[in-house]
């Protein structure tokens, strides 16, 4: 994981530099960002004060005040997103990245968002979850004409309620969202809110799925469910930054789902409460403790907890294929299959042939094999004790007693106190599993197996 550029202070936010003043002086600058590092929170330079969020491997879009209106400039355009070191994907996004920059406003703000279209086809932007005039809702052909290539449209409305929202196209959305067009929106409360707590760390990220053939660089936009790359903010483990907090911090994590399936997001070592959805804050009487929250398609969830347990805690989607890198799905299970004899014969024809999968897939975590260009291993990431055997939608919540307030830098691996790591029991030796697997006894089956029919393929 490249952390050299992780948090270099407030200057990192400013790295979202203005690349050019738009020829039309009426438009605010179109800020852009090329770094995949997590930018420092953007402290509001003007307008109403608020406690900013941290966008995992992303950034917040600067604005300008024009009278009493907060003005932003989004540019829809082709981008190249490095999903992990060495793995670059052609996407469509906003202002240099996919997902686009997070937009942060305050309840009651009048906002004006200019959207310039640099895509090869028309687009729109839908402000997911906002209360606004119907003509600002961004549904192409229904509430507005599409934004043609090369044109700029303006959206204007009042951010009427605080909460966690998204933005995305409602024009050729199958293609445009499959290519990565989406972004986060946070409306902060204008004053102390009885259902919105003050927190010390406030993180946000969007869930993403892509189907990128190994050796290629452009997602297959017609894929419905059988994706091979699962991401937090278009980054995949070990290319995802960790969530670094101080012990005792109240932590809020906001997650949105614009993939084609649900994702049960699970945090280790702590229990949390779902305190908000895209419908608003959850009443306190309706909250209950969880360690996993299922986020359905098109939904947002914000969870909160006190980070009171030190360590490096996994945070991941609980669908096991979603914590993997690109993998073949039409592969027979070889566990328990006796390769003896067959492997030697094959190696006479294919000298590099290897027996794989007969004892499970764990060997893949440590195996270094040549890969096609521009892809990832199925399992990646190394920890202090060896291969992590994870990829995709996986990262770490790092809780440290000496993490300074406002410091989001990676503290490194946790140093476990003596006697607190699971250990081998000396003198005990379990026999290996029988191989090949013991064949079932002949006679009447004790269960009836109904063969699937009509629905091939793999469902996540």
Image: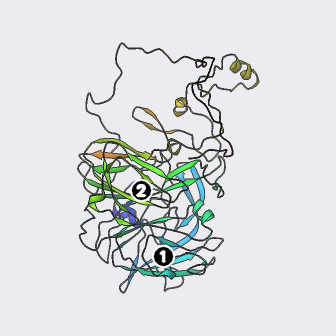
Sequence-first disc among 1 and 2: 2
Where's residue 23, x and y in %?
Answer: 54, 83
Assign a secondary structure to mark 1.
Answer: strand
What distance separates the C-alpha of mark 1 from that of mark 2? Answer: 21 Å
The reply to whether residue 330 is in sight is yes
Looking at the picture, the colour scheme in use is rainbow
Left or right of 349 in this view: 337: left
Instruction: State the residue position of label 1.
Output: 73
Q: Which residue extends farthest front?
A: 444
Q: Which residue extends farthest top?
A: 427
Q: Which residue extends farthest right?
A: 349
In this rendering, the answer to whether 353 lies above or below 173 is above
Residue 130 in which image quadrant: bottom left
Where's residue 111, x and y in %?
Answer: 41, 79
Assign a secondary structure to mark 2.
Answer: loop
Which residue is located at x 62 percent, y 31 percent?
A: 333
In this rendering, the answer to whether 280 lies above or below 294 is below
Left or right of 120 in this view: 382: left
Question: Callout 2: few (<14), some (14-19), or many (20+) C-alpha neighbours within 10 Å?
Answer: many
**Label placed on residue 56:** 2
Residue 172 in which image quadrant: bottom right
């Amino acid at each position: 994981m490249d952390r050299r550029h992780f948090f270099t202070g407030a200057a990192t936010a400013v790295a979202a530099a203005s690349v050019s003043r738009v020829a039309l002086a009426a438009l605010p600058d179109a800020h852009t960002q090329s770094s995949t590092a997590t930018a420092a929170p953007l402290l509001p330079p003007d307008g109403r004060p608020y406690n900013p969020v941290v966008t995992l491997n992303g950034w917040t879009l600067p604005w300008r005040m024009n009278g009493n209106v907060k003005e932003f400039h989004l540019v829809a355009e082709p981008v190249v997103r490095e999903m992990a070191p060495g793995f670059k994907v052609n996407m469509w996004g906003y202002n240099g990245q996919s997902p686009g920059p997070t937009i942060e406003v305050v309840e009651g703000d009048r906002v004006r968002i200019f959207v310039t279209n640099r895509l090869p086809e028309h687009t729109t932007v839908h402000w997911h979850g906002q209360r606004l005039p119907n003509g600002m809702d961004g549904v192409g052909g229904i509430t507005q004409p599409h934004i043609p290539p090369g044109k700029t449209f303006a959206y204007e409305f009042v951010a009427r309620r605080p909460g966690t929202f998204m933005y995305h196209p409602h024009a050729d959305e199958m293609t445009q969202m499959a290519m990565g067009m989406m972004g986060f929106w946070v409306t902060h409360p204008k004053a102390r809110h009885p259902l919105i707590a003050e927190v010390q760390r406030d993180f946000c990220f969007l869930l993403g799925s892509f189907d990128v053939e190994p050796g290629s660089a452009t997602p297959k936009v017609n894929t419905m469910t059988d994706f091979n790359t699962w991401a937090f903010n278009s980054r995949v483990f070990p290319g995802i930054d960790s969530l670094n907090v101080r012990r005792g911090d109240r932590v809020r994590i906001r997650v949105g789902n614009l993939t084609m399936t649900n994702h049960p997001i699970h945090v280790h070592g702590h229990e949390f409460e779902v305190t908000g959805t895209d419908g608003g804050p959850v009443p306190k009487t309706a909250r209950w403790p969880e360690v996993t929250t299922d986020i359905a398609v098109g939904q947002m969830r914000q969870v909160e907890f006190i980070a009171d347990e030190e360590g490096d805690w996994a945070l991941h989607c609980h669908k096991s294929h979603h914590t993997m890198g690109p993998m073949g799905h039409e592969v027979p299970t070889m566990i328990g299959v006796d390769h003896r004899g067959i492997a030697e014969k094959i190696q006479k024809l294919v000298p590099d042939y290897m027996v794989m999968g007969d004892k499970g897939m764990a060997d893949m975590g440590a195996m270094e094999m040549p890969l096609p260009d521009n892809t990832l291993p199925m399992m990646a990431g190394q920890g202090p004790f060896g291969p992590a055997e994870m990829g995709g939608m996986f990262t770490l919540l790092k809780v440290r007693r000496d993490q300074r307030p406002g410091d989001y830098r990676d503290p490194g691996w946790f140093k476990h106190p003596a006697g607190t790591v699971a250990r081998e029991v000396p003198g005990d030796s379990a026999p290996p599993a029988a191989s090949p697997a013991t064949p079932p006894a002949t006679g009447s089956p004790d269960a009836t197996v109904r063969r699937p029919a009509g629905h091939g393929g793999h469902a996540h």
